[in-house]
Image (cartoon, rainbow, N blue to C red):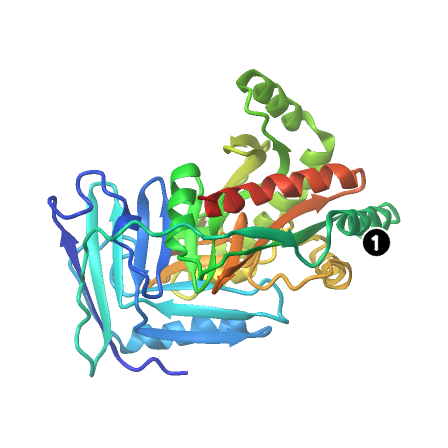
Amino acid sequence: MSAGRLVARTVALEPGSPLWPGGSLLDVLPTDAPVTWLRRGEGLVGWGVAAQLRTSGPTRFADAAKWWTETVARADVVDEVHEPGTGLVSFGTFAFADEPGDSVLVVPSVVVGRRGDRAWVTTVSPADEPVPDADVRIRDVPPPPVGLTFADGALDGERWMSVVADAVARISAGELEKVVLARDLLATAAEPLDVRWPLRRLAAGYPMCWTFHVDGMFGATPELLVRRERGLVTSRVLAGTIRRTGDDERDLALAATLARSSKDLEEHEYAVRSVADALEPHCSSMNVPEAPFVLHLPNVMHLATDVNGVVHDAATVSSLQLAEALHPSAAVGGTPTPEATELISRIEGMDRGRYAGPVGWMDASGDGEWGIALRSGFHEGATVRLFAGCGVVADSDPESELAESQAKFVPVRDALAD
C-alpha cells in the first residue's frame, strides 16, 4: 500500500515550551492515536496518522521494510535538529508469530521528542493536505480505569503449570533445551481505557525500562531487542529472573543467588548466544561480555547482558531488518528456536498476538530502537489483555514459574489501578 508523498518538518522546541524545565513528554500527549517510546524522561511521543501500513504473515517484516523504504524515497523532509528520532519517523508493533496476528507500521502526524538538553517537534502530512497543528501544550490528566475486574485468560494457573510440566518432560527427553511459555490475564473496565493513564504510571514506576504504546500494544519493557545508531548496534538480553521482596538486604542476597544459579545462567547463555549469532553477520566487530550483570527493577531482578557491535551493512540493512534477524531470540522463544516456537504453538494454548514481538521506532536513515513487547498488555475498548512469560529449562519447577509469571504481571496490573 503506497503512502503517497509525505512532507515532514522538524524544528527545535526552545526553553519556555511546556517541556522545559522538567516537563514530561507524556504531559503533551492527546488521545488521537497516541504513540510513545520513552526511557528516563527521554524519547518520542506522537499522535495522529499521516500514513500507515497493516500487514501480517511471514512477510510482515519485509512488507514493512519495503513500504518504509518507498515512503522515505518519496518524502520531502526538512530537519533543523538532526538528532536520532528527528525528520520522518515511523513506529511499529509486530506479531510474535507468522500466524495469526497483525502488524502495524505508522507515521504519526505530529512527533515530539527530547534527547538530553534538546527537544523538537516534527509535523508530517500528505503533500496534498494541510500541515497539522503542532499543538505542544499540557493536556488534562487522563482518567483512571473505572470498575476494573480481572479474570484468567486462556489458561488458569493450574492448567498452565501442567503445560510447564509437559515442557520440562520434553526438555528432559532431549527434544529441545529451552522453551519460553506465556500466559495471559484479562482486565475489563466499565468504560473504554484511556491508555495515557497506565503509560504515565509505567513511565514513573519503571524509568529504566522503555515505556511504549503503538496501536493498542503498551507496556514497559526491560529488554531492548536492538538499537542501531550511527553505525553502532546494541542489544540488551534478559533471561533468568527472581522476584524482589522489598527488603534491600534480602534482595541483595537474592541477586547473588541469581548470579550463581546454574538454571538461570544456562537459560541466559542460550539467549545471549542466539542474539550474538543473529547479529554477527551484520557486524565487523562485536563485544559479548563473558558474564551477565544483575538488572534490578522494582518488581524483579534479571540476569542481563549488553551485546554491542559495529555494523558494516547500515546502507542496506535497517534497524527493523536487524530486529527481524533477531526475532525471536531464545529469551522469548527458546533453544533451538524452530523446535521451541513449534512447541509454543502446540501447547501454550493462546494466541500471543504482538506480545513478545518487536515494538519501537525507526527514522529515515534506518536507525532506530526496537524493544521486545514484554511487561505488556493489548487494549481494545474497555478490555486489556495482560501477558507474562517464563523461560523453561530442564530443572524448572512449575510452581516457581507460575510465581514468576505473576510477578511479571505486576507492572501493567498496577499501572491500571487507580
Residue 207 seen in render: no
Point out residue 220 in the picture as x, y percentages from the top left corner: 47, 46
Instruction: Name the side, left or right, on which 258 lies relative to 47.
Output: right
Q: Nearer the viewer, residue 388 or 124?
A: 388
Point out residue 15 in the picture as x, y percentages from the top left corner: 12, 44
Q: Is residue 354 above or below residue 179?
A: below
Q: Residue furthest right?
A: 173
Locate residue 240: give its quadrant: top right
Instruction: Name the side, left or right, on which 88 lies relative to 58.
Output: left
The image quadrant where one finds the N terminus is bottom left
For the point 46% across and 75% down, the residue is 54
Q: Residue furthest top?
A: 249
Q: Is residue 254 above or below residue 80?
A: above
SS category of the residue bearing label 1: loop
Q: Nearer the viewer, residue 142 or 330?
A: 142
For the point 22% across and 38% down, the residue is 22
Q: Is residue 248 above or below residue 399?
A: above
Tell me the kind of residue under disc 1. Glu
